[in-house]
Amino acid sequence: MKNVVYGLMAVVLLGVGTAARAAADESRPNVVWLVAEDMSAWLPCYGDPTVATPNIDRLAHEGVRYDNAFASSPVCAPARSSLITGMYATRIGSMHMRNVRPSNAALRQDPTAYDDIPPYEAVPPAFVRCFPEHLRVAGYRCTNNSKKDYQFYQPVGVWDQTSSSAHWRDGSDDQPFFAVFNFGGTHESKAFPNATPQPEVVAPEAVTIPPFYPDTPAVRDAVARTYNNIATLDQWVGERVQELEDAGKLHNTVVMFFSDHGVGLPRGKRSCYDTGSRVPLVVRFPDGRGAGTADDRVVSFVDFGPSILSLAGVDPDPRLDGTPFLGAFARERDGYQRGHAYTHADRFDAAYDGVRSVSDGRYRYLRNYVTDQPYIIANAFREQLPMTHDLYALRTSGDATAEQWQMAATRRPIEEFYDTQNDPWEVRNLASDPAHAVRIAAMRERVEAWMVDTGDLGFVLPETKLVREHLWTPDGEQPLTAAAVVQHAAVELAGGEVVCRFTVESATPGASLAYRLGTGPEAMGPWQVYSGGHIDAAKTLGRLEVNAHRIGFKPSAVVIDLGHAD
């Protein structure tokens, strides 16, 4: 029955989606994101030969390797909020990990951990949309397989399909697509002792240990597991590319491979150093553009969404924090952002941090706003990794080497500065070196300008104040998106068919509007993005559902009986 309904809908709908596809430039590429979790550029194409990754190497050989790509946060949910919106998390209130729900690991360790931390959603400015919504308006089919974790619940019109089975191949051949595939096998938790180990490609005794770690069995086990997981990731990348080749789609698809932040080991994930924020990024263009080259442009997660819009021929809103580095509207970043990427560290689960950092690709400046605690803050989830306790032990054992000072420290300096070209592991703090005083002052000013420009919400504490005074004003209660107002009427078309013609609006600025049609509650078609104008639908379908949802607000819905539309 559903197939019949959806087929009928395809014939009778004369709305925005069909018109957009008809007007679309056939030369617009498909775009596929292959996203790994918790992974630094520990790859042969970036100079680390520990495990072979022939499929990722192929992408780098046939595409462009970006050497200065940075996550906006060294942990997933805040970073993903920037990926989907093109906005800094510190501007929209998504900087705390995580704000929608508490960490079960933290609660198991301390049932009172979240007593003073309310659940809430981030609220971007009214002009901000999840960027796939713009792609859908432009005629793209958008699928997500399947992680979201945006620090807010996305409107129903963002994706055509989002699930563990979502796939670009479920669309029509003549419709361009944007498809996201997420690989969780490199996640921090996959190095836990209870995780199913991947086939051993490198043994613990064969791995090179970063100098800031002690050489212990637990550290070697975690590092080896991390590399073995990368080898499995490479197989997954090869499978996704092979699917495109087998379907004859690779010749017109841009493939982007990257990770959602740095390696999921201590002083990687949750740290603003390169190990936590610098990510691999390889872009393979269908025309072979730049094949085998490296690009040293500094790019940030806030730039990724605008770049996909630009590839699709959509000019991104200039009010976004991000700047497109790909496509027809690619341009340089302006002001304090030009040539620099910014990273923040705030609350991780129930423990507060406070770091603001900037990198120009070579030099990194960090400002520690929380100085009275160790670098490796107590974190219940991370403590499931046995090596974490070996790092804790360095604080009291007296066995720390000079390169392990950060692991042994119980306090932090106010400022840190590193030359990552000469000190790739960032263990020699040059903040007091007079030879770098001018550069340090300039980067300090950039961080301060960034914080002022974004109205940095990470310093609005407690979070009850953040919610009450900045996000869900004026009383801290989540606002409700104004219900969609549907104007509808029966209209006779030239051929004599009588349809229901409707338009939709909401009084809430920034509300995303979506609609779907069907014969009843159990037989509804997919959600379509409403972007203005009128929609004609066959009255025989019987039911129209409309959803209005501003990001961070509660959504509202209305139902219309088309059979009785006047």
Image (cartoon, helix red, strand yellow):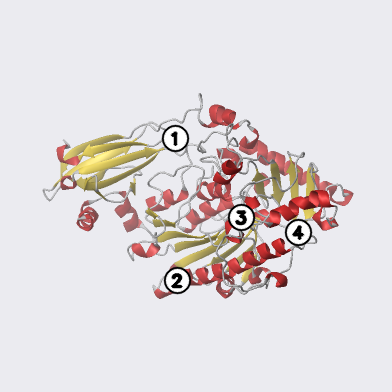
Mark pair 3, 2: CA separation: 27 Å
Camera-near label (1 vs 4) is: 4
The residue that mark 1 highlights is 553
The residue that mark 3 highlights is 261
Quadrant in which residue 59 is drawn: bottom right
Q: Is residue 55 left or right of residue 456?
A: left
The secondary structure type at the circle numbered 3 is loop
Mark pair 3, 1: CA separation: 28 Å
**Where 187 sits versus 46, above or below?**
above
> Where, quadrant-wise, is the N terminus in this rendering?
bottom left
Mark with earlier residue (1, 2): 2
Camera-near label (4 vs 3) is: 4
> Where, quadrant-wise, is the C terminus in this rendering?
top left
Camera-near label (3 vs 2) is: 3
Furthest residue in direction top, as rendered: 475
Mark 1 in CB contact with mark 4 (< 8 angstroms)? no
Residue 261 at what x, y percent from top left?
61, 55
Camera-near label (4 vs 2) is: 4
Mark with earlier residue (3, 1): 3
Mark pair 1, 4: CA separation: 44 Å
The residue that mark 2 highlights is 250
The secondary structure type at the circle numbered 2 is helix
Residue 96 at what x, y percent from top left?
59, 41
Mark 4 in CB contact with mark 2 (< 8 angstroms)? no
Residue type, numbered disc 3: His
Residue 10 at what x, y percent from top left?
24, 55
Mark 1 in CB contact with mark 2 (< 8 angstroms)? no
Circle 4 packing at 10 Å, graded few (<14), some (14-19), many (20+), is: many
